[in-house]
Amino acid sequence: MTVAGLWSPMAHAHSGYPQHPVKLVVPAPPGSSPDVMARQWGERFSKLSGVPVLVENKTGATTIIAAQAVANAPADGYTLLWTFNNTFSINPFVFRKLPYTIEDFVPVTQVLAVPFVLLVAPQARWRTLGDLLDDARARPNALNYGSAGMGSGFHVAMARLLNATGTSMTHVPYRDAFIPDLIAGRIDVTFDASTTAIAQVRGGTLRALGVSDPKRLEQLPDVPAIAETVPGYSANSWQGLFAPKGTPNDVVQTLAALSNQIVAAPGFRTQVREYGLLPVGSTPSAFQKFVTEDARDWGRVIRDNRITID
């Protein structure tokens, strides 16, 4: 069934929701991929529902501040969390204590999948992923990889790749931008989100060795999926919508219905793909199942590699 077929176009009319502005809390700074896509979604939600969507950026602590704020908000559908996989698939395993749990939320719908791109400098000697892995096997821990920090999605995605291939490299976590050091050759390899990586690859600033989605990306058709070399490998992030626990079911269903209308719209799908993202759309129950399985998969890698922050 298509996303458009999941819901009746007038599903929201039965609940009387929404009747006043909706606040969308985003745990990322203005201009970032989650912020840009949340605002694109919010504009379309406003047109469909007739109420404004107010985006509030609550950054810091790897999404914890934003998640806690929404977990403590009234469960009426007017304060929502737009977040990505760190919140529920990584944080619960790398932090010993969190001020929230997945049970404090109702998963509403997955809006997007966010592929990662495996990158090296244009002058790097590795032309393929196979070249890189062969070098890593021959020289354990001699190569290094950068990431956006201990326990970041890029860190765990690389750990998953190393585990799957029986190789080892030295992790170099960054607090700030790490791509300049990759371009300069001060680190050997890293993952980055497709939203920022595609422009770098097309411009020749970086070379891509693979993508984390099981299939090649439309925007980088000559870049193999990592799964072509490492069967079964997949390490996408995602963006999706959550409501506080206790939000009425009719409100949750209305939110999902409206969101899936947005995701099904050709204009939105085209725009999403231009960013290197993949439109998804899902029911609340399907998203609940997805988040549970996603957390299991990422959590296994985190435990196996003993990745902790505190």
Image: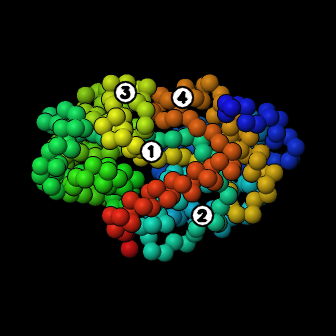
Q: CA distance from mark 4 to mark 3?
A: 16 Å
**Label 1 vs 3, first from the N-terminus:** 3
Q: Residue at x 60, y 30 (%)?
A: 268
Q: Residue furthest front?
A: 231
Which tag, 4 or 2, sits closer to the chain's start?
2
* SS under mark 1: loop
Say which residue label 1 marks. Answer: 236
Q: Amino acid at mark 1?
A: Asn
Q: Quadrant of residue 258?
A: top right
Mark 2 in CB contact with mark 3 (< 8 angstroms): no
Which residue is at 57% across, 69% downward? 100
Circles 4 and 1, Cβ within 8 Å, touching? The answer is: no
- Residue to which mark 3 is pinned: 220
Of discs 4 and 3, which sits in the foreground? 3
Looking at the rendered structure, the kind of residue marked 3 is: Leu
First of labels 4, 3 by sequence position: 3
The image quadrant that residue 79 belongs to is bottom right
- Residue at coordinates 68% horizontally, 40% vertically from top-left? 259
Q: Is residue 114 left or right of residue 122?
A: right
Q: Is residue 183 left or right of residue 106?
A: left
Q: Amino acid at mark 4?
A: Gln
Residue 93 in percent (x, y) is at 45, 66
Q: Nearer the viewer, mark 4 or mark 2?
A: 2
Who is closer to the viewer here, 157 or 230?
Answer: 230
Quadrant location of the C terminus in the rendered image: bottom left
Mark 3 crowd level (few <14, some 14–19, many ≥20, 10 Å Cα): some
Out of 297 and 172, give the one closest to the viewer: 297
Classify mark 4: helix, strand or loop: helix
Q: Which mark is drawn over residue 102? A: 2
